Image (tube, rainbow, N blue to C red):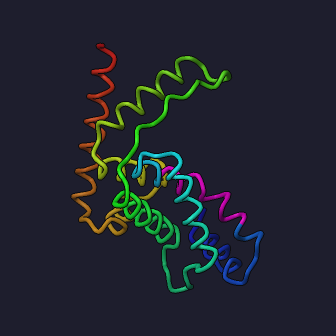
Amino acid sequence: MKQHDLQALLCGVRKGSESAFSELYDLLAKPVYVIAFRITQSRELAEDLTQDTFLKLYLSPPDETVRNPRAWIFRMTHNLALDACRKQQPEELPEELPDPQDAVGQTLLRAALEDAMHTLSQEEREVLSLHLNADLTFQEIAKISDRSLPSVYRCYKRALKRLRAALEEGESV
């Protein structure tokens, strides 16, 4: 979605349009949830934070002066997730039954990737999630997280290297 389209939806939200808010939710709920989950490592908390993000967005949408509303929304999610982490300890992901329609290989890969994600620091999970799930550029991530661009890029590369090593280690077991 282009910034102009997002600005138009937010304009509708500011005017009280439920359809604009619904469309905005449909477009951004998944990446907001993923960002919250990657930071908190809790499904329930990520769901709550997704609701909190959109409630705040509905009650107080950014004004027209916000140049990158997508980044603004992800920044709000980021801040809410960090606040939630400060208030409670992260919990382990519950074991889930695989979806019967899922191929066994995909289920095993998903489980291995989840295990590998636990080897990363919160900062590394956050940068990976913002880049891969929210489709933000490294420059946008640097602004959101108050880090330098080289620091974000190094963190991303380090996270990929650690993920690769964890996955390769899991294969040898």
Q: How many marks?
A: 0
Q: Is residue 99 left or right of residue 71?
A: right
Residue 88: x and y in percent read: 37, 55
User: Can you give x and y, in whole percent of width and height, for residue 5 in the image?
Assistant: 64, 70
Residue appearing at x 27%, y 57% in the figure:
152
41 versus 1 height, above or below: above
Q: Quadrant of the C terminus?
A: top left
On the rendered structure, is 74 left or right of 173?
A: right
Give the quadrant of residue 85: bottom left
- Look at 45% across and 27% down and name the residue there: 111
Q: Nearer the viewer, residue 130 or 150?
A: 130
What is the magenta range? 22-34
User: Which secondary structure is most common in the magenta stretch?
Assistant: helix
Q: Residue furthest front?
A: 88
Q: Position of residue 83 (x, y in %)?
A: 38, 64
User: Any magenta on residue 24?
Assistant: yes
> Looking at the picture, does residue 148 appear above or below residue 41?
below
Magenta span includes 3: no
Image quadrant containing the N terminus:
bottom right
Q: Residue 13 is drawn in which quadrant?
A: bottom right
Considering only vertical position in the picture, is 98 above or below 62?
Answer: above
Q: Is residue 36 above or below residue 102?
A: below
Q: Residue at x 56, y 65 (%)?
A: 52
Residue 51, percent across and down? 59, 61
Front residue (pair 14, 49): 49
